[in-house]
Image: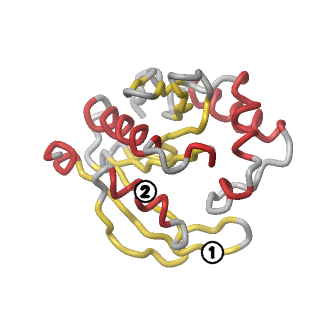
Amino acid sequence: MPDLVFKGTPQLETERLILRKLTLQDADDIFAYGSDPEVSRFMTWETHKSIEEARSFINIILDKYEKDEAGEWGIVLKSTGKLIGSVGIPRYDLKNKSAEIGYVLSRKYWGQGIMPEAVSRVLQFAFEEMGLNRIESCHSLPNEKSGRVMQKVGMSFEGVIREKIFAKNKYWDVKQYAILRSDWQKR
């Protein structure tokens, strides 16, 4: 894998948001949304039961930052300085110049256009800075709010993939979306 895949996971900005590296000081904010059963309901990870689970997640990301593998950004509201979610690229395939994007947001901030704003900025980074050609994402069938985020950022629905993910002791069918660099450039 080439060096500097994520170019140090640089800080990114939008009109309302700062997307920055996570730190251990973010544990309380991550626990605040990670412990909300409504937030974790459709995620592959279990609802956080203790602050230690948030710290464990951060430590995994910090280790990836050291290897320049992370591409995980904390979503911070400029107006308050509060970390309210994260967006990242958990999987990528450099040979085929493709990646997957994932995200999570505190329920208090749902429905305000924050996640499409954050995802759009990461897509811009992935296409323009990383040189990727295809970014995909998926959501469990009942999680249509996540699908709307994908649609708002220009992703196209590609189909239902049956039992793609095994999480929380069951197989999940997912809706698959993707966007190509050429789609992004036409926007």
Relative to the observer, which residue lies in front, 9 or 116? 116
Left or right: residue 174 compared with residue 49:
left
Disc 2 crowd rating (10 Å Cα; few below 14, some 14-19, many 20+) is: many
| Residue 137 marker | 2
- Tell whether label 2 touches label 1 (CB within 8 Å): no
Q: Residue 117 appears at what percent x and percent y?
A: 39, 39
| Dot placed on the residue nearer the N-terminal end, 1 or 2 | 2
- The one nearer the camera, 136 or 110, is 110
Placement of 134 over or under 147, stated as above or below: above
Q: Percent position (x, y) of residue 35? A: 77, 48
| Residue that label 1 marks | 171
Q: Hey, what amino acid is under mark 1?
A: Tyr
The residue shown at (57%, 67%) is 165
Q: Is residue 12 left or right of residue 102?
A: left
The secondary structure type at the circle numbered 1 is strand
Which residue occupies 49% across, 70% down? 174
Q: Amino acid at mark 2?
A: Ser
Marks 1 and 2, how far apart in space?
Answer: 17 Å
On-image quarter of the C terminus: top left
Task: Tell me the quarter of the image containing the N terminus.
Answer: top left
Residue 80: image x %, image y %?
A: 58, 23
Task: Identify the residue at the far bottom of this view.
Answer: 162
Mark 1, other Cα within 10 Å: few <14 / some 14–19 / many ≥20: few
